[in-house]
Image (cartoon, rainbow, N blue to C red):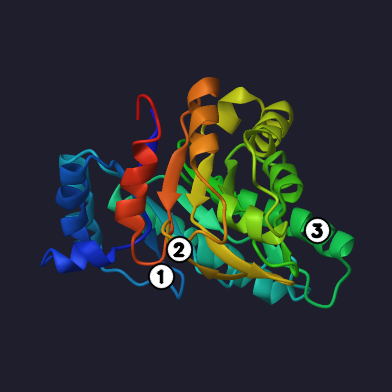
Amino acid sequence: MIRIGPSGNSDAFYASGRKHTYEEAEYLHALGLNAFEYSFGRGVSMTDATAEKIKTEFQKYDIAISAHAPYYTNFSNPDPEMIKKSVGYVMQAAEACRKMGGTRVVVHPAACGKAARKDAVAAAESNLMLLAEAADALDDGAKICLETMGKTNQIGTVEEVVGFCTLYRKFYPCFDFGHINAYSHGGLKTKDDYRRILDYTVDRLGFDKASQMHVHFSKIQYGDKGEIKHLTFADEKYGPEYAPLAELFDEYKMSPYIVCESDGTMSDDALAMKKMHKNA
Protein backbone atom coordinates (compact mmCIF):
# COMPACT_ATOMS: atom_id res chain seq x y z
CA MET A 1 0.00 0.00 0.00
CA ILE A 2 1.33 3.42 -0.97
CA ARG A 3 0.87 6.11 1.67
CA ILE A 4 0.86 9.73 0.47
CA GLY A 5 0.39 12.96 2.41
CA PRO A 6 1.89 16.31 3.41
CA SER A 7 4.62 17.40 5.76
CA GLY A 8 2.97 19.76 8.19
CA ASN A 9 -0.18 21.83 7.92
CA SER A 10 -0.69 23.44 4.52
CA ASP A 11 -2.03 26.89 3.72
CA ALA A 12 -5.28 25.27 2.56
CA PHE A 13 -5.61 23.49 5.92
CA TYR A 14 -5.53 26.79 7.79
CA ALA A 15 -7.73 28.48 5.20
CA SER A 16 -10.38 25.84 5.95
CA GLY A 17 -10.63 27.20 9.50
CA ARG A 18 -8.71 24.38 11.15
CA LYS A 19 -5.86 25.11 13.56
CA HIS A 20 -4.64 21.96 15.30
CA THR A 21 -2.66 18.99 13.99
CA TYR A 22 -5.20 16.49 15.28
CA GLU A 23 -7.69 18.08 12.84
CA GLU A 24 -5.40 17.02 9.97
CA ALA A 25 -6.72 13.46 10.17
CA GLU A 26 -10.27 14.32 9.15
CA TYR A 27 -9.00 16.91 6.66
CA LEU A 28 -6.67 14.48 4.88
CA HIS A 29 -9.24 11.69 4.92
CA ALA A 30 -11.73 13.98 3.15
CA LEU A 31 -9.11 14.75 0.49
CA GLY A 32 -8.30 11.09 -0.03
CA LEU A 33 -4.78 11.24 1.45
CA ASN A 34 -3.51 8.78 4.04
CA ALA A 35 -0.18 9.96 5.48
CA PHE A 36 1.24 12.91 7.40
CA GLU A 37 4.65 13.95 8.72
CA TYR A 38 5.06 15.91 11.94
CA SER A 39 8.26 17.93 12.17
CA PHE A 40 10.26 18.25 15.36
CA GLY A 41 12.85 20.14 13.32
CA ARG A 42 13.60 22.71 15.99
CA GLY A 43 13.30 20.36 18.95
CA VAL A 44 11.01 17.75 20.45
CA SER A 45 8.28 19.34 22.53
CA MET A 46 4.85 17.75 22.86
CA THR A 47 2.68 16.84 25.83
CA ASP A 48 1.43 13.29 26.25
CA ALA A 49 -2.14 14.62 26.07
CA THR A 50 -1.49 16.22 22.67
CA ALA A 51 0.19 13.08 21.35
CA GLU A 52 -2.73 10.94 22.52
CA LYS A 53 -5.26 13.27 20.86
CA ILE A 54 -3.34 13.08 17.59
CA LYS A 55 -3.08 9.30 17.85
CA THR A 56 -6.80 8.89 18.47
CA GLU A 57 -7.84 11.04 15.53
CA PHE A 58 -5.27 9.66 13.10
CA GLN A 59 -6.17 6.05 13.89
CA LYS A 60 -9.87 6.89 13.56
CA TYR A 61 -9.33 8.04 9.96
CA ASP A 62 -6.52 5.56 9.09
CA ILE A 63 -3.93 8.26 8.51
CA ALA A 64 -0.36 7.08 9.07
CA ILE A 65 1.94 9.50 10.87
CA SER A 66 5.71 9.88 10.79
CA ALA A 67 8.03 12.35 12.51
CA HIS A 68 11.10 14.32 11.50
CA ALA A 69 13.84 14.43 14.14
CA PRO A 70 15.52 17.79 14.88
CA TYR A 71 17.37 19.12 11.86
CA TYR A 72 20.67 19.59 13.71
CA THR A 73 21.64 15.94 14.13
CA ASN A 74 25.17 15.33 12.84
CA PHE A 75 26.67 11.87 13.17
CA SER A 76 30.05 12.93 11.80
CA ASN A 77 30.66 15.50 14.55
CA PRO A 78 34.13 14.91 16.06
CA ASP A 79 32.86 15.68 19.60
CA PRO A 80 31.58 12.51 21.36
CA GLU A 81 29.24 14.61 23.50
CA MET A 82 27.59 16.01 20.38
CA ILE A 83 27.12 12.48 19.06
CA LYS A 84 25.35 11.56 22.31
CA LYS A 85 23.10 14.57 21.81
CA SER A 86 22.30 13.53 18.24
CA VAL A 87 21.38 10.04 19.45
CA GLY A 88 19.20 11.63 22.12
CA TYR A 89 17.41 13.89 19.65
CA VAL A 90 16.52 10.93 17.44
CA MET A 91 15.34 8.83 20.36
CA GLN A 92 13.21 11.69 21.71
CA ALA A 93 11.58 12.07 18.29
CA ALA A 94 11.05 8.31 18.05
CA GLU A 95 9.34 8.24 21.44
CA ALA A 96 7.10 11.18 20.54
CA CYS A 97 6.27 9.50 17.24
CA ARG A 98 5.38 6.29 19.06
CA LYS A 99 3.02 8.20 21.34
CA MET A 100 1.32 9.65 18.24
CA GLY A 101 0.92 6.14 16.83
CA GLY A 102 3.73 6.34 14.28
CA THR A 103 6.74 4.16 13.56
CA ARG A 104 8.92 6.21 11.17
CA VAL A 105 11.44 8.88 12.15
CA VAL A 106 13.38 10.84 9.52
CA VAL A 107 16.96 11.80 10.38
CA HIS A 108 19.56 14.09 8.81
CA PRO A 109 22.73 11.95 8.79
CA ALA A 110 25.70 14.32 8.88
CA ALA A 111 27.70 17.21 7.49
CA CYS A 112 31.31 17.38 6.37
CA GLY A 113 32.34 20.30 8.56
CA LYS A 114 36.12 20.70 8.26
CA ALA A 115 36.71 17.01 7.52
CA ALA A 116 37.35 15.44 4.13
CA ARG A 117 34.18 13.82 2.81
CA LYS A 118 35.47 10.25 3.05
CA ASP A 119 36.50 10.84 6.67
CA ALA A 120 33.12 12.38 7.53
CA VAL A 121 31.32 9.39 5.98
CA ALA A 122 33.50 6.95 7.91
CA ALA A 123 32.81 8.83 11.15
CA ALA A 124 29.08 8.80 10.44
CA GLU A 125 29.13 5.04 9.81
CA SER A 126 30.82 4.47 13.16
CA ASN A 127 28.60 6.86 15.11
CA LEU A 128 25.37 5.63 13.53
CA MET A 129 26.10 2.29 15.20
CA LEU A 130 25.66 4.10 18.54
CA LEU A 131 22.24 5.15 17.31
CA ALA A 132 21.58 1.54 16.29
CA GLU A 133 22.41 0.36 19.82
CA ALA A 134 19.92 2.85 21.27
CA ALA A 135 17.30 1.98 18.65
CA ASP A 136 17.30 -1.66 19.74
CA ALA A 137 14.96 -0.49 22.51
CA LEU A 138 12.36 0.62 19.95
CA ASP A 139 9.49 -1.56 18.79
CA ASP A 140 10.39 -4.06 16.07
CA GLY A 141 8.31 -2.14 13.54
CA ALA A 142 10.20 1.12 14.09
CA LYS A 143 12.08 2.58 11.13
CA ILE A 144 14.83 5.19 11.32
CA CYS A 145 14.80 6.81 7.90
CA LEU A 146 18.14 8.36 6.93
CA GLU A 147 17.63 11.22 4.51
CA THR A 148 19.44 12.17 1.34
CA MET A 149 20.60 15.78 1.61
CA GLY A 150 20.55 18.67 -0.85
CA LYS A 151 23.65 20.74 -0.09
CA THR A 152 27.13 19.83 -1.27
CA ASN A 153 28.67 20.12 2.22
CA GLN A 154 26.18 17.66 3.70
CA ILE A 155 26.57 13.90 3.93
CA GLY A 156 23.67 12.10 2.30
CA THR A 157 24.03 11.10 -1.33
CA VAL A 158 21.99 8.14 -2.53
CA GLU A 159 25.05 5.90 -2.25
CA GLU A 160 25.95 7.18 1.24
CA VAL A 161 22.43 6.74 2.58
CA VAL A 162 22.05 3.26 1.12
CA GLY A 163 25.42 2.36 2.59
CA PHE A 164 24.28 3.54 6.03
CA CYS A 165 21.12 1.46 5.67
CA THR A 166 23.15 -1.73 5.24
CA LEU A 167 24.50 -1.26 8.77
CA TYR A 168 21.35 -1.99 10.76
CA ARG A 169 17.98 -3.60 10.22
CA LYS A 170 15.97 -0.56 11.40
CA PHE A 171 17.78 1.90 9.12
CA TYR A 172 15.72 2.66 5.99
CA PRO A 173 16.42 5.14 3.21
CA CYS A 174 14.54 8.42 3.06
CA PHE A 175 15.03 9.54 -0.52
CA ASP A 176 14.32 13.24 -0.78
CA PHE A 177 14.16 13.47 -4.55
CA GLY A 178 14.11 17.26 -4.46
CA HIS A 179 17.38 17.11 -2.51
CA ILE A 180 18.84 14.55 -4.91
CA ASN A 181 17.93 16.77 -7.86
CA ALA A 182 19.34 19.89 -6.17
CA TYR A 183 22.58 18.15 -5.15
CA SER A 184 23.08 16.94 -8.73
CA HIS A 185 22.09 20.33 -10.21
CA GLY A 186 19.08 18.96 -12.04
CA GLY A 187 20.17 15.37 -12.45
CA LEU A 188 16.65 13.89 -12.26
CA LYS A 189 15.10 14.40 -15.66
CA THR A 190 14.04 11.04 -17.07
CA LYS A 191 12.37 7.87 -15.90
CA ASP A 192 15.72 6.11 -16.21
CA ASP A 193 17.29 8.61 -13.79
CA TYR A 194 14.81 7.43 -11.17
CA ARG A 195 15.11 3.81 -12.25
CA ARG A 196 18.85 3.79 -11.57
CA ILE A 197 18.21 4.88 -7.97
CA LEU A 198 15.51 2.26 -7.37
CA ASP A 199 17.55 -0.54 -8.99
CA TYR A 200 20.65 0.39 -6.99
CA THR A 201 18.64 0.39 -3.76
CA VAL A 202 16.98 -2.95 -4.43
CA ASP A 203 20.36 -4.45 -5.34
CA ARG A 204 22.01 -3.23 -2.12
CA LEU A 205 19.15 -3.54 0.40
CA GLY A 206 16.86 -6.18 -1.07
CA PHE A 207 13.36 -5.61 -2.39
CA ASP A 208 11.53 -5.81 0.96
CA LYS A 209 13.48 -3.00 2.59
CA ALA A 210 13.74 -0.94 -0.59
CA SER A 211 10.02 -1.18 -1.27
CA GLN A 212 9.25 0.32 2.17
CA MET A 213 11.45 3.35 1.61
CA HIS A 214 10.48 6.75 2.94
CA VAL A 215 10.15 9.47 0.31
CA HIS A 216 10.22 13.25 0.49
CA PHE A 217 9.20 15.05 -2.67
CA SER A 218 9.06 18.68 -3.75
CA LYS A 219 10.50 20.94 -6.37
CA ILE A 220 13.56 22.75 -5.00
CA GLN A 221 15.49 25.77 -6.22
CA TYR A 222 19.22 25.10 -6.31
CA GLY A 223 22.50 26.85 -7.00
CA ASP A 224 26.21 26.07 -7.07
CA LYS A 225 26.14 24.67 -3.52
CA GLY A 226 22.92 22.72 -4.00
CA GLU A 227 19.57 23.32 -2.31
CA ILE A 228 18.33 26.88 -1.82
CA LYS A 229 14.61 26.65 -1.04
CA HIS A 230 11.48 24.54 -1.48
CA LEU A 231 9.02 25.49 -4.20
CA THR A 232 5.53 24.40 -5.29
CA PHE A 233 4.45 22.18 -8.17
CA ALA A 234 3.49 25.37 -10.05
CA ASP A 235 7.18 26.14 -10.59
CA GLU A 236 8.28 25.45 -14.16
CA LYS A 237 12.01 26.18 -13.88
CA TYR A 238 13.27 23.69 -11.31
CA GLY A 239 12.48 20.01 -10.95
CA PRO A 240 12.04 17.28 -10.38
CA GLU A 241 8.79 15.96 -11.83
CA TYR A 242 6.91 13.26 -9.93
CA ALA A 243 5.09 11.42 -12.76
CA PRO A 244 8.06 9.24 -13.88
CA LEU A 245 8.69 8.14 -10.29
CA ALA A 246 5.01 7.34 -9.77
CA GLU A 247 5.10 5.11 -12.84
CA LEU A 248 8.11 3.24 -11.47
CA PHE A 249 6.63 2.73 -8.01
CA ASP A 250 3.57 1.21 -9.69
CA GLU A 251 5.68 -0.85 -12.09
CA TYR A 252 7.89 -2.21 -9.29
CA LYS A 253 4.88 -2.75 -7.00
CA MET A 254 6.59 -0.91 -4.17
CA SER A 255 4.89 0.35 -1.00
CA PRO A 256 6.69 3.60 -0.13
CA TYR A 257 5.62 6.18 2.43
CA ILE A 258 5.55 9.44 0.46
CA VAL A 259 5.62 12.90 2.01
CA CYS A 260 5.12 16.08 -0.01
CA GLU A 261 7.23 19.02 1.18
CA SER A 262 6.06 21.75 -1.19
CA ASP A 263 6.16 25.30 0.15
CA GLY A 264 2.69 25.85 1.60
CA THR A 265 0.83 23.73 -0.99
CA MET A 266 1.88 20.33 0.35
CA SER A 267 -1.63 18.87 0.71
CA ASP A 268 -2.68 20.08 -2.76
CA ASP A 269 0.51 18.78 -4.35
CA ALA A 270 0.30 15.50 -2.43
CA LEU A 271 -3.16 14.98 -3.91
CA ALA A 272 -1.76 15.69 -7.38
CA MET A 273 0.91 13.07 -6.71
CA LYS A 274 -1.67 10.52 -5.65
CA LYS A 275 -3.56 11.00 -8.91
CA MET A 276 -0.43 10.06 -10.86
CA HIS A 277 -0.61 6.51 -9.45
CA LYS A 278 -2.89 3.83 -10.84
CA ASN A 279 -3.89 2.29 -7.52
CA ALA A 280 -2.87 4.71 -4.76
Query: Of the residues tagged 2 and 3, which is closer to the observer?
Result: 3
Element on which disc 1 rests: loop
| Image: 56 above or below 90 | above
The residue under the point 40% across, 64% down is 39
Question: Mark 1 or mark 2: which is in front?
Answer: 1
Earlier in the chain: of badge 1 and badge 2, it is: 1
Quadrant into which the N terminus falls? top left
In the rendered image of this protein, does residue 270 appear above or below residue 265?
above
Q: Amino acid at mark 3?
A: Val
Residue 183 in the figure: left or right of residue 231: right
- What is the x, y in percent for residue 6? 35, 53
Question: 84 left or right of 77?
Answer: left
Q: Residue at x 53, y 21 (%)?
A: 251
Q: Position of residue 134 (x, y in %)?
A: 58, 53
Image quadrant holding the C terminus, namely top left
In the image shown, does 149 or 246 lie closer to the viewer?
A: 246
Q: Residues within 10 Å of mark 2 (few under 14, many from 20)?
A: some
Tell me the SS state at disc 2. helix
Image location of residue 101, percent across then percent down: 30, 47
The answer to which of 146 and 151 lies nearer the viewer is: 151
| Mark number displayed over residue 92 | 2
> Mark 1 Cα within 10 Å, few/some/many (few <14, many 20+)?
some
- Residue drawn at x 21%, y 55% is 24
Query: Which circle marks residue 121 in the picture?
Result: 3
Task: Point out which mark residue 32 bears.
Answer: none
Contact flag, marks 1 and 2 (Cβ < 8 Å): yes
Provide the residue designation for mark 1: 44
Q: Is residue 99 shown left or right of residue 234? A: left
Could you classify mark 3 by the number of other residues whose Cα lies within 10 Å: few (under 14), some (14-19), or many (20 or more)?
A: many
Instruction: Say whether disc 2 or disc 3 marks the residue closer to the N-terminus.
Output: 2
Q: Quadrant of residue 195?
A: top right
Residue 253 in view of the camera: no
